[in-house]
Amino acid sequence: MPGSAAVSRVAALLLLLVAAAASASASLIVHKDLAQFVRGRNATVNVVLYNLGPGVAKNVFVEDNTFKNTSLFAAVAGKHSKKFAAIDENSNATLSFVVRPIVAGDLPDHPAIFKYEVDGETRMGYSSSQAALRVLTEEESAHRESRALQWGVFFTAAAAVVVGPFYLYTQGMAALNAAPKKQS
């Protein structure tokens, strides 16, 4: 069923928020933000850690192993893991790095793993994941970009068809109301 993946992601996020609100110490939610992947083009990966509180998360470590396979991705900038001394309540921190896909097709996307300490206790969790990353070829990317332009032109033309007559009508009515009225 279309949209069921999105619904399940929203439900999972809501469950995480409820669980985090029920806890009495720092709770992290980690989201992996992925750009569109095109074979041979650089793509930025951001892993964002949100501390919902109410405490400080200390010795936070996050690692994303999805992009370590050198036969699938070339590392361009940054590292796939990072350690943060602390993430304050209601704050976030981001692991960011750049990769270049070497092959096109559907590739596995694994959740990032994170660990942190609260009140001397180590906690561990996993980020969101898309399960599969679609790496496009240059041709597929160009086709998608041209389709986006075509839709943009279509919506602009459709807006002109709707807004144009309305504008002319309001201008005509304004002119009629402004014209001196004949008295009989």
Image (cartoon, grey):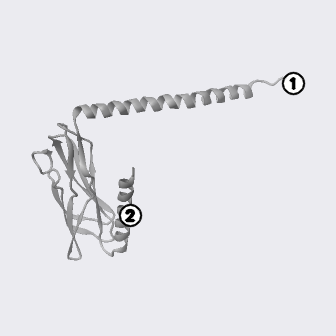
Q: Residue at x 57, y 31 (%)?
A: 163
Residue 11: mark: none
Q: In the visual, does 69 lie left or right of 22? A: left
Examine the image and state in which quarter residue 125 appears: bottom left
Residue marked by disc 2: 14
> Which residue is nearer to you in this view: 129 or 45?
129
Q: Is residue 158 above or below residue 96?
A: above
Helix, strand or loop at mark 1: loop
Nearer the camera: disc 2 or disc 1: 2
Is residue 158 found left or right of 146 in the rendered image? right
Residue drawn 34% across the image and 69% down it: 20
Q: Residue furthest left?
A: 70
The crowding category of the residue bearing disc 2, from other C-alpha atoms within 10 Å (few below 14, some 14 to 19, many at least 20), is few
Judging depth in this view, the residue of 169 and 14 nearest the camera is 14
Q: Which residue is mark 1?
A: 183
Amino acid carrying mark 1 in the image: Gln
Q: Residue at image x 37%, y 30%?
A: 149
Residue 173 location (% of width, % of height): 70, 28
Q: Residue at x 38, y 62 (%)?
A: 11
Task: Give the mark nearer the N terminus: 2 vs 1.
Answer: 2
Q: Three-letter amino acid code at disc 2?
A: Leu
Q: Residues within 10 Å of mark 1 (few under 14, many from 20)?
A: few
Q: Residue 178: x and y, percent?
A: 73, 27
Secondary element under disc 2, as helix, strand or loop, is helix
Percent of width and height locating residue 147: 36, 32
Extreme residue toward the front, this view: 1
Q: Is residue 172 left or right of residue 34?
A: right
| Rendered view: 173 above or below 52 | above
**Quadrant of the rendered image containing residue 168:** top right
Closest to the observer: 2 or 119? 2
Q: Is residue 71 left or right of residue 106?
A: left
